[in-house]
Amino acid sequence: YGNITARLSDEQASLYWEHSSGKKAIRINFDMGSGAVLGFNLMGIRYRHEVCEKWIAQGSHIEEVLSNLGIANFDPEFFDTYEEELVQRYNQQTGRTIQLKKKRGLSAALAFLRN
């Protein structure tokens, strides 16, 4: 979703996580200056298109998006989730301590989209 290019501009950064199996991956591109999320690339993981598009359209900050990733997750209830690992990767790269909020599921997504 959004803007995922083969080469980042000097003003862009990318957060990337890949599962050890190599079959699942998440990439989020964002503006380094403002922190605004520019695009998502998901492999083997499903996120709600409407949620990701709203974050992009609003220019939501990467840390706001990361802390609320559960809202976007569209995988069935008993599938493994990988948002915590992506947040940990961001924290390792930046020295920050972002926490993942536990909101998940259709009701959380609908409440987010209504606002």
Image (cartoon, rainbow, N blue to C red):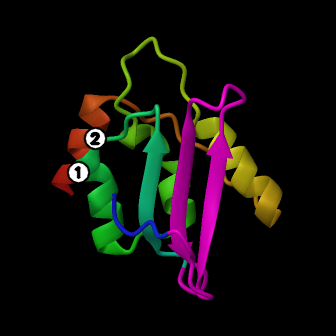
Report the mark closest to the observer, 1 or 2.
1
What's the residue at 64%, 37% (across, down)?
84
Residue 28's tag is none
Residues drawn in magenta: 6-34
* Outermost left residue: 114
Amino acid marked by disc 1: Glu
What's the residue at 62%, 88% (across, down)?
10
Q: Is residue 114 left or right of residue 81?
A: left
Image coords of residue 94 (percent x, y): 78, 65
Residue 109's tag is 2
SS type, badge 2: helix
Q: Quadrant of the N terminus?
A: bottom left
Among the 4 quarters of the image, the one containing residue 106: top left
- Location of residue 1 with respect to 38 vertically, above or below: above
Image coords of residue 19 (percent x, y): 66, 32
SS type, badge 1: helix
Q: Is residue 86 left or right of residue 62?
A: right
Q: Is residue 13 magenta?
A: yes
